[in-house]
Image: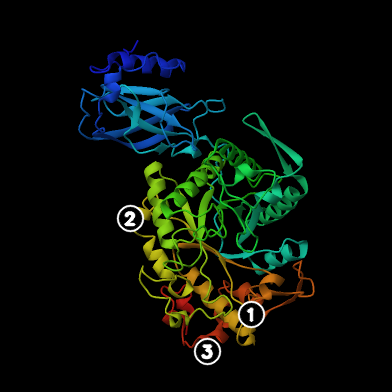
């Protein structure tokens, strides 16, 4: 039997704490009054946890190395203690229930049971190392989450490879789904708002608790995702958190319902026990339902958690500085990541930003996209690396004008990482930036990047209808993305104009809509851009199809303005 962790200066107190940690009993003794009054110096050691991974099926192995010098033994005992924290817990205050310990000087290595599928399941937990001063435990390490949840996944199918980068937000009707097949689209976006999928009709039990989902809404999603999957399309689901009166635990504590024209969606809440358990259950439900191409519901391969998170209009948690904001977002993101990757080994997870790279930030509800990326990489790297990707939205400036090739005239486009805006005009700024060492994935490669939302209007705010301009913009933009080796997908918004957007000169669709039906999206007529998009990736027809655009843009060859132009060998 291993000896009790009893130190030189705090022998009795350490023994009491050890027994408390083992039994959950209250402290055995109170320190003497003179001990309470004695000032205890801060610890001087730091336990740098380097790995936290599942090994051997039902064990979590935590390893690292020590930095600094051992704390004064007159005040601290001779042991390092491992504590488990739930995702919503941030402090060791009042805690005595450590789960493992070692003697100082031993290799920094702990092993604890995973306890998968039990009430003590540690798959989502995080771990910290602490020292004991006779009165309390103080954290002296970084936080570490399990970094390989995918080792538990039942679905190990490889990630589905795409035939092209061409994608589209599709209108969910039989005719429009068939239209997408005709267009040769290989990537599709599906929105999954929590406030729409929660309801009645489908019961789901997770961790002993019951949840209910809207049967009608889920069957609509099932049909769309299944049809896309059957055609070998890569389905990307955008997970959104709309307001639900009956589920306040889904939003950040203290947040109240905001006016709809100011806040569209809310940030996911994993900072409370109830919020964490609910989003974990819903994420697991979705991951299981859309887990494989053999599923009767279809397969989701990409998951985008939230929308344009650098603007709280789409991810509201209330005013807070960027460090705290990213910490709360990353806390929830990791719950989704763990739930999905522990079910589907090769699914990919993303967060999205708009094109405001270094622009319009106010520090409390709006943040620079570049800062969000940096902070997210830093915080998640320190807590346990994840294979996250970036879903970027490089619209033109402004959205009401289709030409992006002259956006440098706005003064918002430069060709370095300090550019206020990064869109299709200077897309290489984004991909060059993502080549920086701190942003690389665990495999040392550039992370997966998808352009998950961009559109070009066919109705200029100043010049009225101009379908040639829209078609030229789509051709140019697709060529840029298709020729950039770090862009995985180019997903257009949208297949059909939306009346609410069209009323604001944001006619992004490849089809016109019926403006007499403002509360519905009803396609009426194809635009010129439809045929351009259909043939843009056809080797025999692509250059002929886009020839008209050169005079509009003011170029002689595509290769003159597009680095590594994919079809350069075919140009005359």
Residue 72, horizontal then vertical, whole percent: 20, 27
Secondary structure state at the residue bearing disc 1: loop
* Residue in the picture at 65% in, 60% down: 260
User: As displayed, is residue 564 above or below residue 311?
Assistant: below
Select label 3 or label 2 by which is in front.
Answer: 2
* Alpha carbons under labels 2 and 1: distance apart: 40 Å
| Quadrant in the rendering for residue 208 | top right
Q: Position of residue 322 (x, y in %)?
A: 43, 55
| Distance from the alpha carbon under mark 3 to that under mark 2 | 40 Å
Whether residue 10 appears in this view of the structure is yes
Residue placed under numbered mark 3 in the picture? 551
Q: Determine whether, in the image, residue 500 is placed left or right of residue 354.
A: right
Q: Nearer the viewer, mark 1 or mark 3?
A: 1
Residue positioned most to the right: 516
The residue that disc 1 covers is 458
| Residue 302, horizontal then vertical, whole percent | 56, 52
Mark 1 or mark 3: name the one nearer the start of the chain. Answer: 1
Q: Please tell me which residue lies in front, 156 or 549.
A: 549
Q: Are marks 1 and 3 in contact (CB under 8 Å)?
A: no
Q: Left of 502 or right of it: where is 407?
A: left
Mark 2 and mark 1 residues within 8 Å of each other at the beta carbon = no
């Amino acid at each position: 039997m291993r000896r009790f962790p009893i130190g030189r200066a705090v022998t009795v107190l350490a023994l009491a704490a050890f027994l408390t940690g083992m039994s959950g009993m209250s402290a055995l003794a109170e320190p003497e009054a003179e001990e309470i009054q004695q000032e205890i110096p801060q610890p001087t050691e730091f336990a740098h946890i380097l790995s936290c991974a599942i090994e051997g099926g039902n064990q979590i192995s935590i390893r690292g190395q020590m930095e600094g010098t051992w704390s004064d033994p007159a005040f601290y005992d001779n042991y390092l203690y491992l504590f488990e924290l739930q995702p919503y817990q941030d402090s060791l205050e009042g805690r005595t229930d450590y789960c493992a310990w070692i003697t100082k000087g031993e290799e920094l290595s702990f092993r604890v049971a995973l306890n998968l599928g039990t009430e003590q399941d540690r798959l989502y937990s995080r771990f910290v190392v602490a020292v004991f001063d006779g009165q309390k435990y103080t954290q002296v390490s970084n936080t570490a989450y399990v970094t390989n949840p995918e080792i538990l996944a039942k679905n190990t199918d490889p990630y589905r490879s795409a035939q092209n980068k061409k994608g589209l937000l599709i209108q969910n009707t039989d005719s429009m789904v068939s239209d997408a097949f005709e267009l040769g689209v290989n990537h599709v976006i599906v929105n999954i708002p929590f406030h729409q999928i929660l309801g009645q009709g489908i019961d789901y039990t997770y961790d002993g608790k019951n949840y209910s989902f809207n049967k009608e809404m889920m069957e609509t999603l099932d049909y769309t995702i299944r049809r896309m999957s059957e055609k070998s399309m890569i389905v990307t689901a955008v997970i959104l958190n709309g307001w639900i009166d009956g589920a306040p635990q889904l939003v950040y504590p203290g947040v109240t319902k905001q006016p709809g024209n100011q806040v569209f969606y809310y940030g996911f809440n994993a900072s409370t026990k109830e919020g964490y358990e609910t989003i974990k259950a819903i994420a697991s439900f979705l991951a299981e339902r859309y887990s494989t191409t053999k599923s009767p519901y279809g397969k989701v391969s990409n998951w985008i958690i939230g929308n344009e998170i650098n603007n709280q209009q789409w991810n509201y948690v209330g005013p807070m500085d960027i460090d705290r904001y990213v910490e709360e977002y990353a806390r929830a993101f990791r719950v989704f990541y763990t739930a999905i990757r522990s079910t589907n080994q090769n699914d990919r997870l993303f967060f999205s930003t708009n094109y405001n790279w270094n622009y319009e930030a106010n520090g409390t509800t709006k943040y620079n996209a570049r800062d969000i990326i940096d902070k997210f990489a830093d915080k998640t790297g320190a807590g346990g690396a994840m294979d996250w990707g970036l879903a970027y939205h490089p619209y033109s400036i402004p959205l009401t004008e289709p030409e992006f090739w002259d956006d440098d005239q706005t003064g918002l486009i430069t060709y370095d990482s300090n550019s206020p805006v990064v869109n299709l005009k200077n897309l290489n700024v984004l991909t060059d930036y993502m080549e920086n060492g701190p942003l690389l994935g665990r495999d040392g490669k550039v992370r997966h990047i998808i352009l998950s939302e961009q559109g070009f209007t066919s109705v200029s705010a100043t010049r009225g209808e101009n379908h040639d301009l829209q078609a030229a913009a789509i051709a140019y933009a697709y060529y840029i993305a298709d020729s950039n080796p770090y862009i995985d997908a180019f997903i257009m918004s949208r297949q059909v104009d939306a009346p609410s957007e069209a009323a604001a000169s944001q006619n992004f669709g490849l089809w016109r809509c019926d403006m007499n039906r403002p509360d519905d999206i009803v396609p009426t007529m194809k635009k010129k851009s439809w045929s351009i998009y259909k043939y843009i990736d056809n080797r025999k027809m692509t250059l002929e199809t886009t020839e008209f655009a050169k005079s509009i843009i003011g170029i002689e060859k595509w290769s003159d303005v597009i680095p590594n132009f994919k079809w350069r060998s075919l140009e005359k």
